[in-house]
Amino acid sequence: MKRLLNKKIVLILPLTALLIISLLCFAFSISRNVYAAMSELVLDANVLSFDGRPEIVPKLDNGVVSLFNKGTDNFIIETHVNKANPSVKLKASYYSDKIYGGDNDAVSVEVRLLFNKWPQDGEGGGFSNDATRVSLAIYNSVDIEFVNPIAVSEVYKTTEDFIGNFVRTLRLSPEKVCNNRGKLQDFVLRVDSDATSWSSAIIIDYVKIVFDTRDAGDSEILLAGNCITGNNPENITDTNVVWTKAEGYSDTYMDLSSYGGFYAYVEDPALVELRKEKFPNAECVEESDGTETLLLKNAVFAFDVGNVSADDYKQFLMDVLLSDKRGKGNHTLYLYGTNPNKFVDENGNPVGYVAKITVKNYEQGFRNKFLLEEEDVKKLAGDDGIISHIYVLYHGNTLDTAEKTVGLRNGSQIWVNKIQFLIEDDVEVPTIGTEYDKYDISDVFPVGESVSILNKTVNNIGDVVSNAVVKNKRIGELSFDLRMESGDNICLLFNAKDGKQVNEYLEGGILFYLSEEKIEISSHKGGEQTTTVSFVTEGAFIDRTSVKIKCIPYCLNSVDAGFYCVVQLNGNEVLSGYFNKDNLDFGSAIHLCYQVKDKDFSVEMFSSKTDDITSAKKLMRVEIKAEGIRNSYDKTDIPLVLSWYNTGFDVISEINCDGKIASVNQAAKRIVFNDNGEVKLSYSITNVFGTFESNETSLICEDVVKAQGAENIYKSVWFIALCCVPVASFCIVCVVLAIKKTKSTKSYD
């Protein structure tokens, strides 16, 4: 029995070990299959090595290594290279699945690294000062002659250009980096420099294998740094533009504190340098403060977005930030689609573009967006419906004229973040604000219960003329009742730039046009009508009609995007629209206005309230009072204060002074008394809503000094002489006696 038991133990132990090994292998194979199905597989640096010699770099709280650690916990390895041995082989063969030419085809292999390229000797080595170029490239391990690099970092051509370190994510084509069995194994990092002596360090954060698990119906979000291409990739003939290109950044902190913002982490942005070295034919002017201004216009750069079918997408978004720290003027950028015929005409004016944005200086983050809806997305495509390239034209400063180029600060930059093609399910529905100020018309304009507004033919037919304007009042909802005849109209301009009269207001704002023929909402910018929605109606206001107008801020992609506008008649919505803020200039003034017709006409406006109506007189608050009396000398020349609710085009009457004992200086707003007594003062304000009388204020003066005649002056002089001479004589005698006494005292001593 004991011998049999021993035999069983001998058999059980190997079987158990075999079972454990089988389970481990099965678990390992499952984990590999799971990884293969993921969109990304990150090989931490602790599973990599340089020629079998891993050198783990301790994680630091600060220093160059901490540049890697933005939210990651990857282990990091470091190796050193020098002029004598400029290459090192990176072993990445721990992932053994086929990633190219099989079921798990990868889109790319990414290597995230830091390359130390200090030009001076120091800790960690450096490049000698005679260096004129330095770059880092990646090669397949079978390319022993180093003739076909898989990826190359920037080639730095001057000492100033390559001071410091760079962190980059170099993207490799799987078919180029894998071995002949389609597996990721080894690749070589090689430094190239013409320095007479150098040594440097290469630090690896991770190697990432990226799989494309995107379905055909998914949105496509491209990182701009991945889309960089060379100058003029489609060989477009346009001699009126200059070409430049973007540079890639694997990740960076956008220092937006200079623009009144914050630090923002951005992954894979693209950067376009606007500096004189990039545009040798553009003039660069030195300013009095020592800064330089680059006089640049019509510079183009391109992005390669692959092969995007325009029909699959409902919206396009592209984030842009322009950093011109000079803060003089703004800048215009134009977006073009695949293979445009040309960018500008012979006079340098943009043609054939799909979208335009005005980029403000010191804008926080990527708040400037190219935003295209479905119809405009199709305009980005070529004749085959495919979008392969998009182009951005820097047109120039908004202050540029045909005679003068204002330009921008030399060294300014254009950053591009994400390039997004969104399917219908991913298009963000505008978020409309729920908290906004609601007013009745009687709380804004002095209509009281009702008013008939006479609109006269005073300008060219078709002009829009302001009757009244209220500044510094941002209104979300305005209610009133309206009655008018055929051919009459009334307009309300919301969020206008300022209180200017007539057509000048069209520099900005959202105009609500109400007439018996149609209702229209339009946005305005720079004297142009940019967006319009309209509704045709007949006889809507012949009878008294309840009207409600809304102009409410809305957001897209969590960013303020513009205003959502609505017109309701008798409680029913008849017209609405979204007005993007890029298409309008806006402020906080509201105008009551009308469009000039070929005859005079009047419109009746009513308060929408049934009770607690703000009377026109109460809203106007026409008052007069005196103030500034500090002492008795001021009481005969008193400043007057006139105050009222200013509607922009009010006419002030003469100040009424009913007494004969004072006069009013209308220009200086002062009353001057020439006799004692009481006067009563008042004035009135006249505007399109009527004439409004002020209160009557009463002033009494008792401090006017009568002018004295010659006889009184003669008597006064004799009185002074008779009274003052004896007193003066007595004082002189006292002084003489005091002096004499003093002298006698000194003599005695």
Image (cartoon, rainbow, N blue to C red):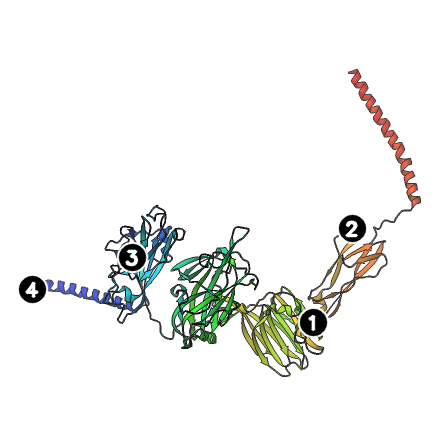
Task: Give me the disc on residue 296.
Answer: none
Q: Secondary structure at mark 4?
A: helix
Q: CA distance from mark 4 to mark 3?
A: 62 Å
Q: Which residue is mark 1?
A: 447
- Most foreground residue, 101 or 256: 101
Nearer-N-terminus badge (1/4): 4
Taking the spot 38% from the left edge, 57% from the top edge, the residue there is: 70
Q: Amino acid at mark 3?
A: Leu
Q: Which residue is mark 4?
A: 4
Residue 654, can we see it? yes
Task: Give me the disc on residue 634.
Answer: 2
Image position, residue 199 (x, y; %): 31, 49
Task: Give me the disc on residue 189.
Answer: 3
Residue furthest out toward the top? 748
Q: Nearer the viewer, mark 4 or mark 2?
A: 2
Q: CA distance from mark 4 to mark 2?
A: 129 Å
Circle 4: is it few (<14), some (14-19), or many (20+) Cα within 10 Å?
few
